Image (cartoon, rainbow, N blue to C red):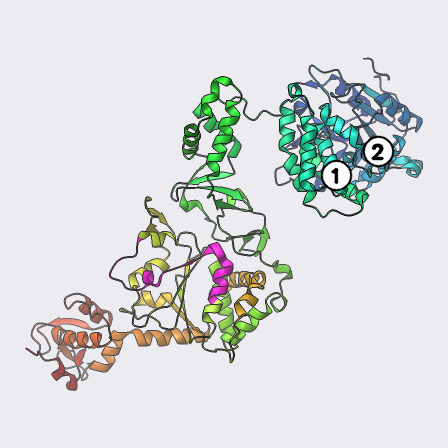
């Protein structure tokens, strides 16, 4: 069809011939952009000449310049990224105005413009777009006002989504469809046409109709659009919003929408029909998830604003999208189904081969799947592929579905191991997102974070957190329980924050003791409960000396938690010192779940032990001294508040923020041990160092300023051991062996091993002898 203008440019470089700036996007996803310069007249020629196999293959244009800020999905075409606008564009897709009429109205108003049809345009269903240039680039905030001028000239014919700032449109034709048409209206620049403000019309305050101002939804026309397959998606959205405004119940609206779709004859139900029927629950969730106003027109306007954004994000061309066959190209056998399963669910599922479980990414984190969802997905993919060919009906079989699920476990995109979870020690999962403990800031969780746990609550944002307002009872409780010792409170806050992390560099444990009702259990329980999946109970038997080694599954349970709590230590028990050193040393731990293979992991947990009685130590060496910190809770309140735990629960979000501040303090300053911690720890070791007590109580050290031998006191190993073993047994401690353990203790204490010297026969040690009054107690009895 010949154009209604001359393709030859005029000499005065008027609005149709003067180059303007456009941004060209390769496709609707706008992962790439390119600024181009050209006139509307040149653009018209190119639109008529450009064709592609589908709309998705056509370039997209926008009369604007964009910055380099991308959305989370990598898209440049967002409202926030628009820098300047060089013109406006609008879309007509649901009314009756023909492009020729639009061209005539624009020329009558003296506006320079390009009108062009889309590949879906027919005389019965006119679909066209309009572009009007500016004389100069304008701020993006002015676009709405200037587009309203054009909409006024066109009698409100432009669709509401035209007013979305970043709205862009494809340009060109589609092979096999009627060629597009272009119409150029000669006239003035839009930004120099202030007289048009008087008749300007903003975004239609409607949910449908022909586009006239204030027009309400034509329900019959919308239902007809579905029945005739003219427009499924937009009509369904508008009908749902309209019926919701009339207080129709959700289930009833769902029934009415499905009934409308069922009016389409079966022979005409293409893939587009099936896809749109599937979206009905999503439409209902969005509409009825909002608070519905009693004023129907207010609801309609509000919903339209929301749906504009949804529409432009999902379908930037403003038209019913072409259906993409996601299963095309997959073989109709089990291997093909596994490939289709992978294509459909990669990024959503992972299979942990150590735990033998599927995990699904939901709500900012990966969650263990307990409902055999992967088998359900395998069934769905198998069934969908089987429906493509009668010869593939064998895929609709339970055994096949189970084989698909098992096969998918080995696919590299799904295969995972326990060591991969929560590998970033400074990320903390919460119900509302992931906290980066390096900064204390909350952000949305991403699959590549591999966060698999969450706290019980989302913290109060740190920039607005005030402990006196957000957790006043917690602050008062700690002040009481720790006797107002600010250094002890700071230490406990740092310990709480350190426990939020997956770091174990301090290689210490905290033992909290105090009388009943002192608050020690309440304090630890609050942290334990709000840390939720990051906390685990440890059986006291795992930490104290037992006849049998702890089962590897007890250790496997400690893979992942960052806070491990043991309580109710028994009087007279002894620490399993080698186990304590292993669990706090930061070295890899080998463990396994029941009936599973062994695996190795680096601990992320910190041990917090609560009790009235501290278990004893058999060997107070430097390694064990480094690992213990003791904090006394010895200021019980005058009256116990039975409801304190539930009162503190209301403050969990604030308490979590309090702990996050402790994590920041710990990173900057390390664990600052309060004086009360240092004193309590020192006293504990003084009591538990039985060997040092024996040296002090039963032995004399050194000797007359060395005799001629230079050895001082000398005593036989046998006599010393008899005295030591008797002392050890009286204090409920194993003395160790005469040949190995005991001599090593003496050497560590600084005594020199001798033989046949200093008046003794056989082996002995110099610098030590038994007290005179004790020698008789050490003689042989038989």
Along the line of sight, the residue nearer the viewer: 489 or 772:
489
- Above or below for 758 versus 327: below
Along the line of sight, the residue nearer the viewer: 126 or 259:
259
What is the spatial separation of the Cα atoms under label 2 and label 1, in whole angstroms?
A: 41 Å
x%, y% of residue 325? 58, 24
Is any atom of residue 180 visible in this view?
Answer: yes
x%, y% of residue 557? 38, 53
| Quadrant of res 108 | top right
Q: Which residues are magenta?
A: 524-551
Label 1 neighbour load within 10 Å: few <14, some 14-19, many 20+: some
Residue 263: within the magenta? Answer: no
Quarter of the figure with the N terminus: top right
Is any atom of residue 69 visible in this view?
Answer: no
x%, y% of residue 32? 64, 32
- Label 1: element kind: helix
Q: What residue does disc 2 label?
A: 134
Question: Going by the image, does 179 lie left or right of 365?
Answer: right
x%, y% of residue 105? 90, 26
Quarter of the figure with the C terminus: bottom left
Along the line of sight, the residue nearer the viewer: 29 or 270:
270
Residue occupying the point 76% across, 30% down: 222
Q: Residue furthest top?
A: 1
Q: Residue furthest left?
A: 782
Q: What residue does disc 1 label?
A: 243
| Label whose residue precedes the other's in the sequence (2 or 1) | 2
- Label 2: element kind: strand
């Amino acid at each position: 069809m010949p154009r209604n203008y001359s393709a030859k440019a005029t000499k005065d470089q008027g609005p149709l011939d003067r180059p303007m700036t456009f941004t060209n996007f390769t496709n609707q996803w706008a992962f790439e952009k390119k600024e181009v310069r050209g006139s509307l007249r040149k653009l018209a020629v190119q639109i008529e000449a450009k064709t592609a196999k589908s709309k998705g293959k056509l370039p997209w244009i926008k009369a604007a310049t964009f910055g380099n800020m991308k959305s989370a999905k990598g898209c440049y075409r967002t409202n926030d990224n628009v820098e300047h606008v060089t013109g406006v564009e609008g879309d007509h897709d649901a009314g009756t105005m023909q492009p020729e009429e639009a061209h005539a109205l624009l020329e009558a108003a003296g506006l320079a413009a390009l009108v062009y049809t889309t590949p879906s345009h027919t005389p019965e269903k006119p679909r066209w777009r309009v572009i009007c240039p500016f004389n100069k680039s304008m701020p993006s905030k002015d676009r709405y006002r200037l587009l309203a001028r054009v909409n006024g000239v066109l009698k409100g014919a432009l669709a509401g989504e035209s007013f979305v700032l970043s709205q862009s449109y494809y340009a060109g034709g589609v092979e096999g469809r009627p060629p597009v048409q272009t119409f150029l209206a000669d006239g003035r620049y839009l930004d120099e046409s202030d007289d048009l403000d008087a008749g300007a019309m903003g975004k239609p305050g409607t949910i449908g109709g022909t586009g006239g101002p204030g027009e309400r939804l034509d329900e019959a026309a919308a239902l007809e659009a579905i029945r005739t397959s003219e427009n499924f998606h937009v009509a369904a959205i508008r009908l749902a919003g309209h019926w919701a405004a009339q207080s129709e119940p959700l289930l009833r609206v769902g029934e009415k929408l499905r009934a409308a779709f069922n009016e389409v004859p079966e022979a005409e139900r293409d893939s587009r029909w099936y896809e749109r029927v599937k979206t009905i629950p999503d439409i209902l969730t969005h509409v009825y998830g909002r608070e519905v106003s009693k004023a129907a027109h207010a609801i309609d306007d509000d919903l339209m604003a929301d749906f504009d954004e949804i529409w432009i994000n999902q379908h930037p061309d403003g038209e019913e999208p072409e259906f993409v066959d996601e299963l095309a190209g997959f073989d109709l056998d089990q291997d093909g189904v596994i490939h289709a399963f992978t294509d459909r669910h990669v990024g959503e599922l992972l299979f942990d081969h150590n735990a033998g479980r599927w995990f699904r990414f939901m709500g900012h984190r990966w969650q263990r799947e307990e409902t055999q969802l992967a088998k359900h997905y395998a069934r769905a993919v198998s069934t969908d592929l089987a429906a493509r060919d009668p010869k593939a009906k064998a895929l609709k079989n339970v055994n096949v579905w189970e084989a698909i699920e098992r096969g998918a476990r080995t696919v590299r995109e799904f295969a995972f191991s326990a060591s991969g979870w929560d590998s970033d020690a400074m990320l903390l999962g919460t119900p509302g997102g992931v906290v980066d403990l390096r900064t204390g800031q909350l952000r949305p969780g991403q699959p590549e974070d591999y966060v698999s746990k969450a706290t019980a609550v989302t913290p109060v944002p740190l920039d607005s957190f005030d402990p006196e307002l957000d957790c006043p009872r917690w602050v008062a409780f700690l002040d009481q329980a720790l006797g107002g010792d600010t250094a002890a409170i700071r230490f406990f806050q740092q310990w709480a924050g350190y426990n939020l992390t997956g770091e174990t560099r301090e290689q210490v444990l905290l033992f909290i003791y105090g009388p009943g009702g002192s608050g020690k259990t309440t304090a630890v329980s609050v942290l334990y409960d709000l840390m939720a999946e990051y906390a685990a109970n440890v059986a006291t038997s795992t930490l104290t000396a037992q006849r049998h080694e702890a089962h590897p599954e007890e250790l496997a349970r400690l893979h992942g938690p960052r806070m491990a709590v043991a309580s109710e230590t028994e009087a007279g028990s002894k620490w399993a010192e080698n186990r304590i050193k292993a669990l706090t040393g930061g070295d890899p731990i080998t463990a396994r779940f029941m009936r599973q293979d062994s695996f190795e992991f680096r601990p992320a947990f910190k041990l917090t032990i609560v009790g009235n009685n501290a278990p004893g130590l058999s060997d107070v060496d430097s390694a064990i001294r480094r690992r213990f910190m003791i904090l006394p809770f010895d200021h019980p309140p005058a009256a116990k508040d039975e409801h304190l735990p539930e009162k503190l629960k209301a403050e969990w979000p604030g308490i979590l923020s309090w702990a996050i501040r402790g994590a920041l303090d710990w990173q900057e300053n390390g664990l600052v041990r309060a004086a009360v911690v240092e004193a309590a720890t020192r006293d504990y070791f003084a009591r538990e160092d039985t060997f040092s007590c024996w040296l002090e109580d039963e032995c004399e050290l050194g000797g007359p300023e060395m005799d001629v031998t230079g050895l001082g006191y000398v005593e036989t190993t046998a006599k010393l051991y008899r005295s030591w073993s008797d002392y050890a047994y009286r204090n409920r401690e194993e003395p160790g062996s005469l040949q190995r353990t005991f001599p090593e203790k003496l050497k560590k204490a600084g005594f020199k091993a001798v033989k046949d010297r200093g008046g003794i026969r056989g082996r002995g040690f110099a610098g030590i002898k038994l007290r005179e009054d004790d020698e008789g107690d050490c003689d042989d009895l038989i």
